[in-house]
Image: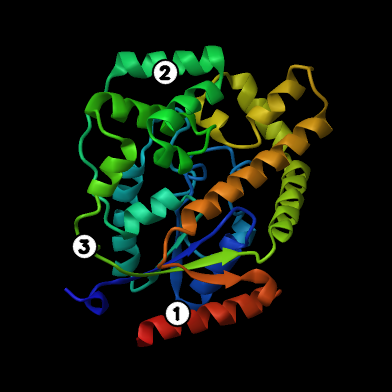
Amino acid sequence: MSGRDKPFVLAVAGPTASGKTRLGIELAKEYGGEVISADSMQIYKGMDIASAKPTQEEMQGIPHHLIGVIDRTTPFSVADYVVMAREKIGEVLSRGKLPIIVGGTGLYIDSLLENVQFSEVRSDEAYRSALYETAKNEGNAALYERLVKADPEAAQSIHMNNLVRVVRALEVIHVTGKKFSQLKAESRSEESPYDSLILGLDCAERSTLYARIDRRVEEMVAAGLVEEARALWQEGGMRTSANAIGFKELIPYFEGSAGLEECIATIQQETRRYAKRQLTWFRRNERIRWIIIEDFGKMNEILENSKKAIANYRNV
């Protein structure tokens, strides 16, 4: 089947605070689309502010899928995401609408659009429990260093504080004797069922993106981030909550060992580091059509440039 015979799926990718959510909504309004989130934190219930879930007002009546649908205590993998996202794409297409994948989790987007095949790797509960115990006693960084040594390529694509994914990568390496990244490469053997275009948002100057991130964090604090984090902290150790930047950084404040301003500055720093990792991931994908936001400035200009990129792609 040639590319143009397949259903067309549009994606909007990029680092945090680059404007993906807004552009995705504007494109959905323009083309009669529905948004399917590709965010590893937004998929969980709660954590609304920390994961920057769009509000009903921001959605502007555009249907959004795979946001707040998984309980925070439920294990959830990229394989699970692909199954759910494919189902949603089918539903959107059946309504005659355009599926628009929007998010900053590159692993989710790539796995979905490149038709990554996930082999059933058995679990080792005892080994997994031991890894979580190590993280508890020695910190996430100690566990992450194990992954860096065992599989540097996999470590580059996984955030140190995404404990669930770090543990799973180490467990897979332990069980299979193969690098996690090697298994991932072996999984890309089947043709994608979609004709897809990925638009990427980025800034020409890193300082521009960092300023947007710092402002975003300040807006999240004003919206109630501290109160949201405190409530979850008081509920007790939920793994997925600890993965969301904006929660663990506030624990010293809750415990009285650090001031609020210091903790907020740490959130900004960690978010900037996360954005850098996102860009490292996305820049390896030669299929992405990049849009540099400083070149246009306003959303209507970014939208027009996006429409030109879509038209050029569809007319090739």
Q: Which mark is residue 191?
A: 3
Q: Which mark is residue 89?
A: none
Q: Secondary structure at mark 3?
A: loop
Q: Amino acid at mark 3?
A: Glu
Residue picked out by circle 2: 131
Which residue: 44% across, 58% down? 284
Task: Determine the CA span between mark 3 and mark 1.
Answer: 22 Å
Q: Nearer the viewer, residue 64 or 299?
A: 299
Q: Does the image show residue 61?
A: no
Q: Amino acid at mark 2?
A: Leu
**Quadrant of image for the C terminus:** bottom left
Residue picked out by circle 1: 310
Q: Is residue 148 above or below residue 29?
A: above
Q: Secondary structure at mark 2?
A: helix
Q: Are marks 3 and 2 in contact (CB under 8 Å)?
A: no
Left or right: where does residue 51 sit relative to residue 144?
Answer: right
Which residue: 38% across, 72% down? 97
Q: Secondary structure at mark 1?
A: helix
Pinpoint residue 87: horizontal percent, then vertical percent: 29, 55
Q: Earlier in the sequence, mark 3 or mark 1?
A: 3
Q: Is residue 2 above or below residue 312?
A: above
Among all residues in the image, which is located at the extreme left?
A: 1
Q: Amino acid at mark 1?
A: Ile
Q: Quadrant of residue 164?
A: top left
Left or right: where does residue 153 sit relative to residue 2?
Answer: right
Q: Does the image show residue 271?
A: yes
Which residue: 51% across, 42% down? 41
Q: Quadrant of residue 259?
A: top right
Pinpoint residue 93: horizontal percent, then vertical percent: 31, 68
